[in-house]
Image (tube, helix red, strand yellow):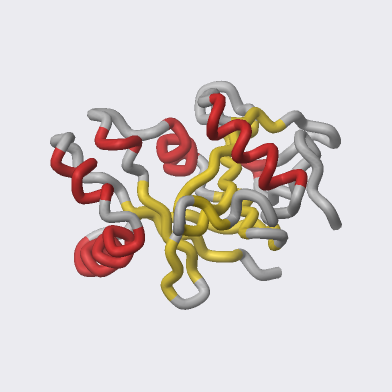
Amino acid sequence: MKWQRNAPLPFRGYHCRVAAQEKIYDSPSSWVRTHIQNYVETEGHKGHAWNGVYTLLLTTRGRKTGKLRRTALIYGQDGERYVVVASKGGHPFHPAWYLNLKENPEVQIQVAADKFTARAHTAAGAERERLWALMAEIWPDYIKYQGKTEREIPVVVLEKITK
């Protein structure tokens, strides 16, 4: 099945129900929005590989609006799990997508042409340290971003939900 921009997503669960033709709102950042559009239109042929790293598309349910929100993120892998970092470039506040998945941890993921539902959790303790090192190796700027903010930048684990 080919995903189309603004196509409905098969969320499951009370907090993640989706109307038949519910619109997906892409990142307000114009360059990220363009990246997402290219990714979706080509099933990841354009956009999965980006600046020497790989990206995925994460769709969350807005905690305030209830709208579906989509962004593109650099990812790493820990076995079958995907790992992303809520850095927001070292901004003092968490990115909206992170706050959304904290409220509604069931999310939609697209990795290249593969689309699936996942459950998100924030890594803590030894798991966070190990995954932070993995992600800092993939994108060393994460270390600079951590130096710019007092908040601990969250590392998020995305685990595919199997039926």
Quadrant in which the C terminus appears: bottom right
Q: Residue at x 32, y 42 (%)?
A: 87
Q: Residue furthest front?
A: 51
Q: Residue at x 80, y 39 (%)?
A: 7
Q: Would you place residue 59 above or below residue 22 in this image? A: below
Task: Give left or right: position of 123 versus 65.
Answer: left
In this view, the residue in front, 127 or 140, is 140
Counting from the top left corner in percent of width and height, residue 155 is at: 33, 54
Count the labels in the image: 0
Report which quarter residue 19 is drawn in. top right
Counting from the top left corner in percent of width and height, residue 141 is at: 27, 48
Report which quarter residue 84 is drawn in. bottom left
Report which quarter residue 61 is drawn in. top right
In this view, the residue in front, 36 or 9, is 36
Q: Residue at x 71, y 40 (%)?
A: 17
Task: Give left or right: position of 148 versus 79.
Answer: left
In this view, the residue in front, 53 or 81, is 53
Task: Give left or right: position of 114 versus 126.
Answer: right
Q: Residue at x 56, y 25 (%)?
A: 30
Q: Would you place residue 102 above or below residue 78 in this image? A: above
Counting from the top left corner in percent of width and height, residue 118 is at: 58, 58
Quadrant in which the N terminus appears: bottom right
Q: Residue furthest bottom?
A: 79
Counting from the top left corner in percent of width and height, residue 143 is at: 20, 50
